[in-house]
Amino acid sequence: MENRDSRRISALYLSGVEECKKAGVDLTPEAYAEIWEAAKKAIAPGLSVPAFLQLPARVGSVTLWPITIGASLWWKECGKGYFEGEKESDQLVALAWMLAHAREPTAFDAATSRREAAKAIRKWLWKEVRGVTLAELAVAVGDVLGWDDGFDGGDLVEAGSGEGSSIDWGEYLASLCGGYHRPPEYFLWCCGAELVEELARKMPSPFGEVAKSADSTGFFRFRKTIERIKSSTAKGTGEGEAAV
């Protein structure tokens, strides 16, 4: 690992530790290790599957696709509000349904109420899901969404890829449409946030130059780790205890 990366990892790690201590967290050895690993992945994630491959996960009769921008926007604006108060098994199935239909915009057209979304999910379960257990589905969902420790209901709110709203993504995608001469539907329903970021970096324009420094996925996950460690103590689940 380059010395520059080592220094950046150490600085990010120390900032996370200091933030937790200021919040009154009595960090355990496991929490220190978790913060270090999160900092390392944020700065030097190492080898990973290229975003262009967008590999799906197959389990039983179900194929789960990497979350597209269109699906993530539905989740952020509709789905998470429908299901975050439900049983963990129901949350899992809702996420699996979303990923199974991530490239099918028409699947979300009628799922704009809790009742209609639940109806669509039940229909999918009865007609299309065979030869898969909830445990196997949980592993597949965790793999597709990039959760190192698998599915956990506490991650429900963070399931969407990217932090932007429809308005935020609109301006961003408009630049890509012009640069790549593709319709917006392509970027919304065939691409995830990581692929869109990669395409933006490769675009030969000033927009591409700006996007080259915009890889925030690792840092977002680092921040999520710090906030979880802080909140786990506040909720009395144990100092620095992993909730994911």
Image (cartoon, helix red, strand yellow):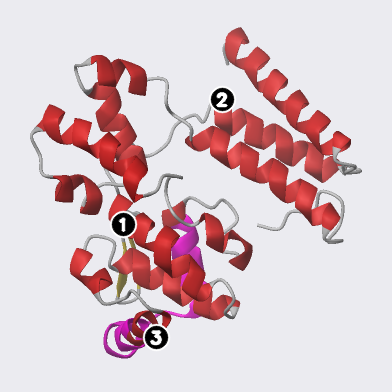
Name the side, left or right, on which 63 lies relative to 220: left
**Foreground residue, 163 or 60?**
163
Q: Amino acid at mark 3?
A: Arg
CA neighbours of label 3 inside 10 A, class few (<14), some (14 to 19), many (20+): few
State the SS at label 3.
helix
Characterize the magenta stretch by its predominant secondary structure: helix
Q: CA distance from mark 3 to mark 1?
A: 28 Å
Q: Can residue 237 be seen by looking at this rendering? A: yes
Q: Which residue is mark 3?
A: 115
Q: Which residue is mark 2?
A: 43
Residue 190: % across, % down: 21, 51
Name the side, left or right, on which 137 lies relative to 182: right
Q: Amino acid at mark 2?
A: Ile
**Foreground residue, 125 or 164?**
164
* Range of magenta residues: 120-143
- Number of residue marks: 3
Q: CA distance from mark 3 to mark 2?
A: 43 Å
In the image, residue 80 sits, relative to residue 115, either above or below, namely: above
In the image, residue 90 sits, relative to residue 138, either above or below, namely: below
Quarter placement of the N terminus: top right
Disc 3 + disc 1, Cβ < 8 Å = no
Q: CA distance from mark 2 to mark 1?
A: 26 Å
Q: Which residue is mark 1?
A: 56
